[in-house]
Image (cartoon, rainbow, N blue to C red):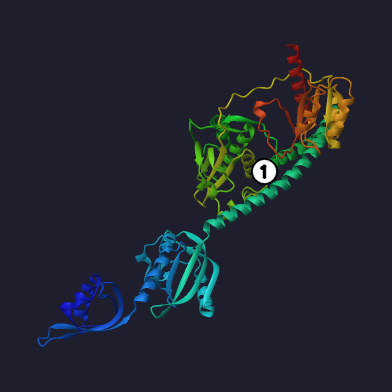
Amino acid sequence: MIALPALDRYIHAGDLAAFIARLKTEKKLTNYEHRLKRKDGSPIWLLGSAHLVEDKAGEPSICEETFIDITERKKAEETFQKAFNANPEPIAITTIGGDRYVSVNDSFLRATGYRREDVVGRTSLELGFWGRPEERSRLAGTLRENGTVRDVEITFRTKSREDRTAMYSADVIEVAGRQCCITILRDNTEQKLLESQLRQSQKMEAVGQLSGGIAHDFNNLLGVIIGYSEILEEQLPPGHALLKECGQIKKAGRSAASLTRQLLAFSRQQVLDTRVLDLNSIVVNVEQILRRLIGAHIDLRTALDASVGSIKADQSQIEQVIVNLVVNARDAMPGGGKLMIETTNVDLDEDYTRRHPPQKAGPYVLLTIADTGVGMSAETQSHIFEPFFTTKEQGKGTGLGLSTVYGVVRQSGGHVWVYSEIGRGTTFKIYLPRAGRLARPEKLHEGGAGSLRGSETILLAEDDEGLRELTRDILTGSGYTILETDLPENAIEVARQHKGRIHLLLTDMVMPGMDGRALAKALAPMQPDMKVIYMSGYTGFTLSGLDDSEIILLPKPFTKQTLLQRVHEVLELEMKLDAK
């Protein structure tokens, strides 16, 4: 028994006022926790029951109390609470059955966006925590049956109504004498996003390799089809009944060649004529074409940053990227809308690139094309860059437009990302590496205006027999002397045995054992003045030094006119240089 005035000698100062107030009001306290002071002043936690004893005048004068020392328990609870709040994983303690929150840690509040007072005392259903409420019932049944749940993926909803995924674990524990459930969440939303992006990237790589291999073989076949249809067409007299059929063969071959080029663009295996370019100039140059494509019902606007850096790319391919995206935007706005094209410089940090693999940190030029059209679902967005995937009606588009965009941008060292919601439009963001130097005016080829016939000696190296024979027939028919060979080592032997001058090496870029550039290098000591034209419709590389070199390309499949024009340009330029 303690006299009330003497309580301050025993009860900890921080608890005294509250204890006296409750005791005077309630007269009797049961299972009341408070701190007392030991003789040395150190605190001791007690679980007590107390009541007031009144004096003769009816005034409370004495406190009669019984105690249980719970100091060790309180220390354990304090240690648990510190660990509970410091844990980086979201943790919640709820009642079993009612699922009412008893306590949550700071990580839980950060993950869900709630304040503690918003959560404690309420149920998960009242908060709308479960993205799929049926998951709660299923997990509650497992917990009742087994007493534990381990690493089950759930969807939970934050205060801002964002759905996120997490691995859910739970155990039955006892808190203050009653059974509760302790739940631990491991938010894996970003991880699943990265895994999804990685799977998509790997799928695109696999499809790209397949497409590139098919396109490589097709280019040689199409070159033969187109070339011989032209030769046959020239040999038929005017009005011949087969002229129409020849024309149809040539037309079909060229259409197939166009599809093949798009497949190679997607697989990043086309030969790019890369140069240092001003992206703003490219947008300005195609703007009038774009306005004719989209029509007057769409409001096209541009916002071009005057300080935007240079890029290193193939101008015709970047133009194709812009046209393809604008046509897609037009089709997404059949009733009209707004279309914006913007350019600006950006510097991407490690945090951004970590969330957008395989993009690397560094300086980029950002090309943004945004529309106010119908938008796309997340499912559609996951497939739009795949070859032949289309949401358009049958007969309207090949399904290669966006796959071409993807391939060109990736082969140029850049990345393309799409952001869209149903009914809220679509935005494409294309990041192209800054070149670090100024764009130069385009150099024009010096081509002859007269006959495309010649008499020079040409060493032809092509491993595809059909295409080699076609090329030989076209060149010999135009007066050239042809030294023909199938493999690089045979070409070296032919050149070694040839006694005269070889004016031009016409070689496939990709051949067994040795590529075209290695062959040209091997032949240079024997024929130091020999010019070189590289043929290719497929390559595993880009010619990064093309804007500073004399490398001349002949893309496959080529027409008779294109072949003769390119050969004539190179040899005519040589004659002009010799004349000087």
How many marks the image carries: the answer is: 1
Can residue 502 be seen here? yes
In the rendered view, does 379 fall on the left or right side of 454? left
Query: Crowdedness of circle 1 by 10 Å Cα count: few (<14), some, many (20+)?
Result: many
Pinpoint residue 261: horizontal percent, then vertical percent.
71, 39
- The residue beneath circle 1 is 266
Give the amino acid at mark 1: Phe
Q: Residue at x 48, y 64 (%)?
A: 156
Q: Residue furthest top?
A: 580
Q: Quadrant of the N terminus?
A: bottom left
Residue 526 location, quadrant: top right
From the viewer's perspective, is residue 35 above or below residue 521? below
Q: Residue at x 53, y 56 (%)?
A: 190
Residue 515 location, quadrant: top right
Pinpoint residue 260: horizontal percent, then vertical percent.
73, 41
Q: Residue at x 75, y 22 (%)?
A: 570
SS of the residue under disc 1: helix
Pinpoint residue 395: horizontal percent, then vertical percent.
67, 46
From the viewer's perspective, is residue 140 above or below residue 211? below
In the rendered view, does 43 fall on the left or right side of 144? left
User: Which residue is at the front of the view, 346 or 247?
Assistant: 346
User: Which residue is at the front of the view, 327 or 205?
Assistant: 205
Pinpoint residue 450: horizontal percent, then vertical percent.
76, 17
